[in-house]
Image (cartoon, rainbow, N blue to C red):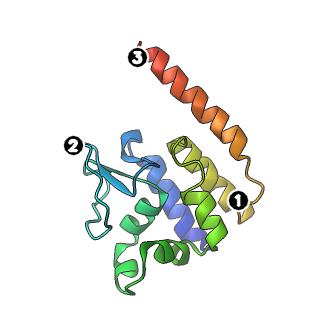
Amino acid sequence: MNRENVQTVRDAIAAAPPEEFNYNHFFSDVRNGRSPSCPEVIPKPHCGTAGCVAGWTLMLFRIEADSRGESWEVAVQRLLGIDYATYCNLCYRQCGSADREAALARLDHLLQHGNLRDYDFHREWMECHGRACAEERQRA
């Protein structure tokens, strides 16, 4: 694992406004709901877009990823120094119900343990569901 790059991604996601993280899209335009399907248009941080862990990774390390002509999945694995199973658990597993706090917890676990094999995805789902319910009650 490339600890320095994982930490960089984690810190950038933590520092960004919550609306600039979205596990459902590689990138999406927060202002008009558009979700570009190709990573060729990689925005800069804090420009009205939201991205997932993979999207943030490529945004932060764009020059290095571009120079090799890799698929974005391979580039993220290489940049973070993780295997395919860890990549899937970090970037895809339960992404429809996960939020920024879940991504930070996954990245913290990865930094501490070097993998996500023993990460508790069930507990994460329960916590994310609880946060979503609380937010819905506040809006009502």
State how far apart marks 3 and 2 are (Cα). 21 Å
Residue under numbered circle 2: 32
Which residue appears at 49% of the width and 61% of the height? 9
Q: Is residue 22 left or right of residue 129?
A: left
State the image quarter where residue 33 is shown: top left
Whether 140 is drawn above or below 133: the answer is above
Look at 31% across and 51% down and name the residue there.
Answer: 28
Q: Residues within 10 Å of mark 2 (few under 14, many from 20)?
A: few
Identify the mark at residue 139; answer none if there is no mark: 3
Q: Amino acid at mark 3?
A: Arg
Q: Amino acid at mark 1?
A: Leu
| Amino acid tagged 2 | Asn
User: Relative to residue 20, is residue 23 drawn left or right?
Assistant: right
Mark 3 or mark 1, earlier in chain? 1
Q: Where's residue 131, x and y in %? A: 55, 28
Residue 132 in picture, x, y percent from top left:
52, 28
Position of 32 relative to 44 (above/below):
above
Furthest residue in direction bottom, as rendered:
68
Mark 3 or mark 2: which comes first in sequence?
A: 2
| Vertical relation: 139 (above or below) 118 | above
